[in-house]
Amino acid sequence: MKRTPLDHNERPLAGTIKSNIGSQTTGIVLSGGGTRAAYQAGALRALLPHFERSPETINIIVGSSIGAINGLVLGAALKKGYTNAVSVLYDLWHERRYENTFAGSKALSLFRAMKVAIYQFIAPGPHASQQAVFDPTPLINRIDAVIQDYGGLQPDQRAPFLQAIAVMTTIEGEQRKPLLLISSHKQLQPELVQGATFEALYLDNLSARHGLASAALPAVLPPVEFEAGGKKITLVDGGIAQNVPIDPCVRFGAAQVISIDVSGRNWWLERYGKEQDSKPSWEIPADLKTFCLRPPLTFSVVVRKSLGTILKQAAGNGKHLRKILGALWPAFTILKNRVGEEIAYEIASYGAVDPDYIHALVETGYNDTLKLLRDQTRVEFSASHSFDEWAKSL
């Protein structure tokens, strides 16, 4: 399947939309969601007409899990403009194959998957483990190369208007804790730290390894170790702490936030008849003394539909799907037999690496966001008068 190029002439809204983003501090928040994060590249592309003339309005970027890696790429490439940044992210997703994303053969990954499956059977859930199905070294090297192409993410090397860039991670241990890794022009004032659910670790520079720390879902990708305050810490997936880290974005000064949530949480909760504020048992519970800040203005792109159906359309259900899923194929087969095809495809939508599927995700993100903007002449940020009202809109 041929991908649609980033062509100014193909964007019907370009040149006709006037942005109301204005001079207010704007943050972009990118959620986790595995391969589904390719959707974010399409959504960001749909926003081109709003940002290409004034990329300096993007002041804060915060990502969680694979959204953290997208955020690092976006933040680095912004140095040469928003159009360039989206194009770089767009191309990175379209070049993804198993061979240039993970090290080792699919047979080796299958062997690792069998070991992990035994471990997970004994102790279900995203528990601490040095065992991982995939080795993402090729992807990390590629992301680092892109970041270095633009001089790195130090405050004096990146786009000067990018005040802060951060990734949400989780400290692994007997009691998991949220940790925000951040490169910022300034640190939070004490009054803004009060009530935060996370601790912040200020770094001069961020690299792909920090992004991997945010994306290191236990048993799927390996944990990442860092030295902090003279101590060695082990970091895993930021989605266990905050998968849509809007609160830290607000604390660092965002008056308006554009969030792109590809987690699929809404679909899963509706599928099983759960309340929208329900949380899985493995997510870190908030302390009673903590609270989340909400932005005065938000523009939210949320995946509320099944993306498993897109995977099925792109990959089918035969040999091609088996080839795409590789080490995940046995788990897919078991799930299909036990809970049905719909659920099996939806779970597989987080891990499938296939050009046609990724292309479809990017285009879906573009079209869904374009639809949100279709009847607007500008990005319409919404204001809510209560936390509950805001939370329901996400």
Image (cartoon, helix red, strand yellow):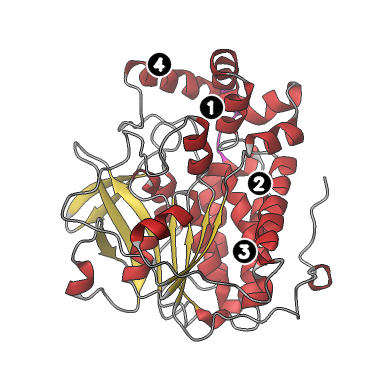
SS state under label 2: loop
Nearest to N terminus: mark 1 or mark 3:
3
Q: Which residues are magenta?
A: 102-109
Q: Residue at x 23, y 60 (%)?
A: 196
Nearest to N terminus: mark 2 or mark 3:
3
Nearest to N terminus: mark 1 or mark 4:
1
Q: Residue at x 35, y 63 (%)?
A: 386
Gap in angstroms between the C-alphas marked 2 and 3: 18 Å
Gap in angstroms between the C-alphas marked 1 and 3: 32 Å
Going by the numbered disc 1, the residue's amino acid type is Ser
Looking at the rendered image, the quarter that the N terminus falls into is top right
Query: Hey, which quadrant is residue 211 in on the image?
Result: bottom left
Gap in angstroms between the C-alphas marked 1 and 2: 17 Å
Query: Hey, which quadrant is residue 354 in on the image?
Result: top right
Percent position of residue 271, x then y: 52, 32
- The residue labelled by disc 2 is 96
Gap in angstroms between the C-alphas marked 1 and 4: 14 Å
- The residue labelled by disc 1 is 109
- Foreground residue among 113 and 31: 31
Q: Assess disc 2: are there few (<14), some (14-19) or many (≥20) residues with their C-alpha within 10 Å of its C-alpha.
A: some
Q: Assess disc 1: are there few (<14), some (14-19) or many (≥20) residues with their C-alpha within 10 Å of its C-alpha.
A: many
- The residue labelled by disc 3 is 44
Indicate which label's residue lies in the foreground, 1 or 3: 3
Task: Please state if 221 lies on the left or on the right of 78 as rendered.
Answer: left
